[in-house]
Amino acid sequence: MTDQARTPPAAARPCPICGKPAQQAFRPFCSPRCRDVDLNRWLTGRYVVPGRDDDVEDPE
């Protein structure tokens, strides 16, 4: 038996968009709507992963 098999499942976290309990089928979201809201935020640039100032893009 591995360590992962003995550890209890993590506590269910609420949906990061609306706070309702997450549903297994849409995890970590509660519904397709919240999943799509999150995707839209990424695609429109509302969420941004910051880079360092000294990062240089490839000059290809």
Image (cartoon, helix red, strand yellow):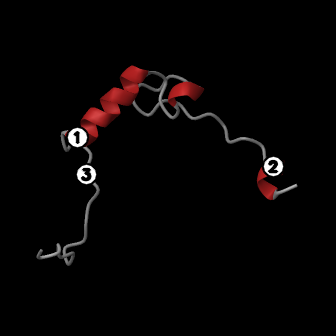
Residue at the image position 17 percent from the left and 75 percent from the top: 58
Q: Specify the amino acid type for callout 2.
A: Ala
Q: Is residue 51 above or below residue 2?
A: below
Please say if the residues under marks 3 and 2 sit with CB atoms less than 8 Å apart: no
What's the mark number on residue 5? Answer: 2
Q: Is residue 20 above or below residue 40?
A: above
The Cα atoms of the two marked residues, 1 and 2, are separated by 37 Å
Q: Is residue 36 above or below residue 56?
A: above
Instruction: Work out whether residue 15 can be spotted.
Output: yes
Residue at the image position 78 percent from the left and 43 percent from the top: 8
Instruction: Report crowding for label 2: few under 14, some 14 to 19, many 20 or more residues within 10 A (C-alpha).
Output: few
The Cα atoms of the two marked residues, 3 and 2, are separated by 35 Å
24 sits left or right of 38 in the view: right
Instruction: Report crowding for label 3: few under 14, some 14 to 19, many 20 or more residues within 10 A (C-alpha).
Output: few
Q: Which residue is mark 3?
A: 48
Looking at the rendered structure, the secondary structure element under dot 1 is helix
Q: Specify the amino acid type for callout 3.
A: Val
What's the mark number on residue 43? Answer: 1
